[in-house]
Image (tube, rainbow, N blue to C red):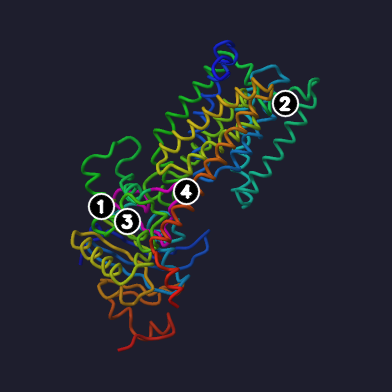
Amino acid sequence: MSSSIDCTIKTEHLAVGYSKFPIVGDISLNMHPGELLVLIGTNGSGKSTILKTMAGLLQPINGQLKILGSAPGSLPKRVAYLPQHPVSTHTLPLRVRDVVAMGRFAHLGLFNKPTTHDNKVVENSMRLTGIDSQANDPIRDLSGGQQQRTHLAQVLTRQAEVLLLDEPTAGLDVNGRKLVAELIASERARGVTVVMATHELQDAEQANTVMLLAQRVVSIGAPEVALRDEYLRECFGFTQPH
Amino acid sequence: MFIEPFTNNEFMRLSLAAGILVAITCAIAGTFVVLRGLAFIGDALSHGVLPGIATAMLLGVSGVIGAAVSSLVMMAGVSVVSRRFRLSGDTAIGLLFVGMLALGVMITSRSRSFVGDLSRILFGELLGVNTRDLILQLIALVIIGVVAFVARRPFLLLCVDEGLAKTSGFSSRLFHNLMLMIVAVTVIASFQTVGTLLVFGMLIAPAATGALFARRISTMIFIAALVGSVSSYVGLLVSYHFNLAAGASIVLTAVLIFAIAATYTEIRKAIADNGHNEHEHPHSHAGSHIK
């Protein structure tokens, strides 16, 4: 068993929620490099709240949460977060390239100039998500799926050790969903820990750990354990076809 | 007719220089006001400085000091009301806005030259600026320019998505307050030339015109500065030849430029949409005949 120092994400009796009102409580888990945690549940089950807390956007209500051994939000260069509904200002028609390049700001800080390496990372991320042909288009002119690919590219440019993805396949077609699965697999292969929130049971197939949520942890464990019929019935009111 | 008023009159040259400095200052601050949706707080700040300036006038000290104190009170008040009483930011701004404006008018009404003082604060004295005013405006421009350049990345992230700013390692509260400080310094430095009422126009109109064409913040600031500077020149000429209020002429010119630019972009978009539709359905009429 790995020691706690190897943990990329460690929680002990963590409770998350808004304004001191817990939505999900008593979350205890250890994640290691290269592992995938999939959060599954209906709307309002607490998936996004857990991810926002891990990203440092919400304070934990109770318990302990360490990301790469530090408090959430304190390691912006090493943790990247894709929100459920990424926002792009429509007042200023920013180009895809500029939106993707914002992912490097955590590394550049206030004073560093982008280097050739930074530019290469941006170009490579756009190519990986298949948005490079629209690099100079205003993001507001793109379809929902293309915008989602742009924001995925932005997250990849962070070159983080922990990826927190809130419904990354939202708005994507079959090819887009396949692309996300491949991207997650390749990130995991280089040791990145991924936490992904989703509605789709099929997204859990490749996970090391699945957490089934319904404003509480219904089940947690390997997919074959956490997605047993009794848990699915409790969470969604139906079971998977066998 | 277009050059002589400036070559023959020193006050016109000074006014034009002040107008251009105000235009560039407002272009930087106004760009963030427009992109971050701070128009209401910008408006409130431009009026909320009134009691400070009025008190300073009564006490015989610099209006700039009074305006600075008023701005600080206003921003602290908005922060306290919105955080302590769980009211929306808009409500907090509105409360402080009307309260400070009413206090300003009450203080000004104690002055013997009430109407003259109020008019001077609201509409400025562009044609009466001196070298000291220009230096003050230049210092404000340098401060705002340096802050905006250093904080350009967190400012851009705040304009796009506050959460992204936080997860990129930038304190959203710190940089939001820094953005408000830029707006406050712009108002404080510019009220003597264009007045508190019209500085808001110079913050919004040129930046809004820039937003119609720009794809990057730096381009938007450049267009806004250009529109503001042209407005200063045209407004001063109109004021000189037709004996109209200089500050109001400048701001009205800036708003008219926005209207012309917005009309142009709409026409261009309509033409492009028509061309696109014809390209996609070149035989739609023929198709309907066959049917």
Tag 1: residue type?
Answer: Gln
Magenta segment: A71-94
Could you tell whether A24 is left or right of B80 in the image? Answer: left
Nearer the viewer's eye, disc 4 or disc 2? 4
Q: Residues within 10 Å of mark 1 (few under 14, many from 20)?
A: many
- What residue did someone put label 2 on? B119
Tag 4: residue type?
Answer: Arg
Nearer the viewer's eye, disc 3 or disc 4? 4
Q: Residues within 10 Å of mark 3 (few under 14, many from 20)?
A: many
Q: CA distance from mark 2 to mark 1?
A: 57 Å
Q: CA distance from mark 3 to mark 1?
A: 16 Å
- Residue A226 placement (x, y as % from top left): 32, 78
* Callout 2 touching callout 3 (CB < 8 Å): no
Could you tell whether B108 is left or right of B136 in the image? Answer: right
| For residue B189, above or below residue A49 | above
Numbered badge on residue A67: 3
- What residue did someone put label 1 on? A159
Determine the secondary structure under disc 2.
helix
Of B52 and A149, which appears nearest the observer? A149
Determine the secondary structure under disc 4.
helix
Identified at 30% across, 89% down, the residue is: A242
Q: CA distance from mark 2 to mark 3?
A: 58 Å
- Residue A139 placement (x, y as % from top left): 39, 53
Instruction: Give a yes or no on whether discs 2 and 1 share a subunit.
Output: no
Name which of mark 4 and mark 2 comes first in the sequence.
2
Numbered badge on residue B268: 4
Q: CA distance from mark 3 to mark 4?
A: 51 Å
Tag 2: residue type?
Answer: Ser
**Residue A130 sits in quarter:** bottom left
Determine the secondary structure under disc 1.
loop
Identified at 18% across, 59% down, the residue is: A190
- Residue B69 placement (x, y as % from top left): 62, 28
